[in-house]
Image (spheres, grey):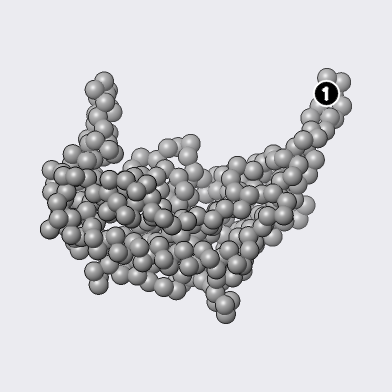
Amino acid sequence: MPHEGKTGVDNIELFQDGRAGFYGARTPAWHRLGTTTEKAVRAEQALHLAGLDNWNVTTRPVFTTGPDGQPVALTKHRATVRRTPGTPAGSFDALGVVGTDYQVIQNEEAFNFLTELVEDGDAEFETAGSLQGGARVFVTMRVPEIVTVAGHDHINLYLAVTTSHDGQSAFTAIPTPVRVVCQNTLTLALRNARSRYRVQHRPGQAPSAEDAREMLGITVAGGLDLVAAAEEMLKLSVSNAEFDEIVAREFVPMPSNASDKQRENRTVDRRGLAYFFRDAATQDLGRNTAWAAFNAVAEWSEWSKPKNPHAAGSAESAIIGDIAAVRQKAWNLFAPSQYTSVGGRGAPVSISAN
């Protein structure tokens, strides 16, 4: 019989055998859910550890009942169905309802897209997981290149892939630099760069090895652009007062009609942002600069910013959701305009060069 998948913290799926649908290398498992390994692993093992292997997603007819109780087919729709992880053979889940032209992209294809980047097949995967009861999955792979800001601030380069089995989103590959000192995912759309790759779930469309290799080039080029921008941002001074004013205006505004609870929550948020900018050891490289200001917001967005309980889980939100949007806004505010996705004003006019 079909059943709905269960979800835990941050929408990580909980399988019926008690496992959580998450795998991560070296860092603690997501909210103590899932499996952690001492080092990154290859595709087959990452798939298995995250419970993403052998789902065998297919589309099936959808029926309802008429007034007489007899089955009636919905001819313009199909259901996506998988073999249920953590259960005996013969158990299955209905993941979503899609159109008749929906093309399934299996979890294995997401991993294969990334594996194609490494010619010797030695691709190493850092995280993988199932969200929203299996409706969405994600996987990240570390790119061999490492970039460094000012000789000290190391940034690892990753490619993340997200896809869905419910028709709500395309297969998407996104470069995701991670600042080593604080493990923040800096998923940014840089100016004049194609920052993401999409394949719709339609007949004749599928992720390709050629596209994967192009994404590798985009990822490395984006990392170099990030370093160039950071070097410029280290030359731009931001005082405590300037940072506080930007926070109050752009990130934690205080409504004139705010309730006592709202004022209390926003005051806590402002203090948290002030801490990350003024005191956090992760900003020691460029204290009171635009680079520190951007990273303070980025760090706060992942570790302190209140999450929308109806939004995607934090693992996915850091890549394509609310968290990524906050970071992009901070980047467009603090980075030089030639490196912003909107070609906007870059660093606020009140910031001055050192």
Relative image position of residue 173 (x, y in whole percent): 53, 57
Q: How many marks?
A: 1
Residue found at the very far bottom of the displayed protein: 120
305 sits left or right of 19 in the view: left
Look at the image and tell me in which quarter the C terminus lies: bottom left
Residue at image coords 45%, 64%? 219
Relative image position of residue 29 (x, y in whole percent): 45, 58
Question: In which image quadrant can residue 99 be found?
Answer: top right
Relative image position of residue 292 (x, y in whole percent): 22, 55
Residue at image coords 39%, 55%? 190
319 sits left or right of 16 in the view: left
* Residue behind mark 1: 66
Q: Which amino acid does label 1 sit on?
A: Gly
Question: In which image quadrant can residue 51 be found?
Answer: bottom right
- Mark 1 crowdedness (10 Å alpha carbons): few <14, some 14-19, many ≥20: few
Q: In this orientation, which residue lies closer to the viewer: 94 or 206?
A: 206
Residue at image coords 40%, 48%? 324
Q: In this orientation, which residue lies closer to the viewer: 52 or 253?
A: 253
Is residue 321 visible to us here?
yes
Is residue 63 visible to us here?
no
* Mark 1, secondary structure of its residue: loop
Relative image position of residue 96 (x, y in whole percent): 67, 41
Question: In which image quadrant can residue 48 be found?
Answer: bottom right
The relative height of residue 44 versus residue 173 in the rendered view (above or below) is below
The relative height of residue 30 versus residue 121 in the rendered view (above or below) is above
Look at the image and tell me in which quarter the N terminus lies: top right
93 sits left or right of 63 in the view: left
Residue at image coords 16%, 48%? 351
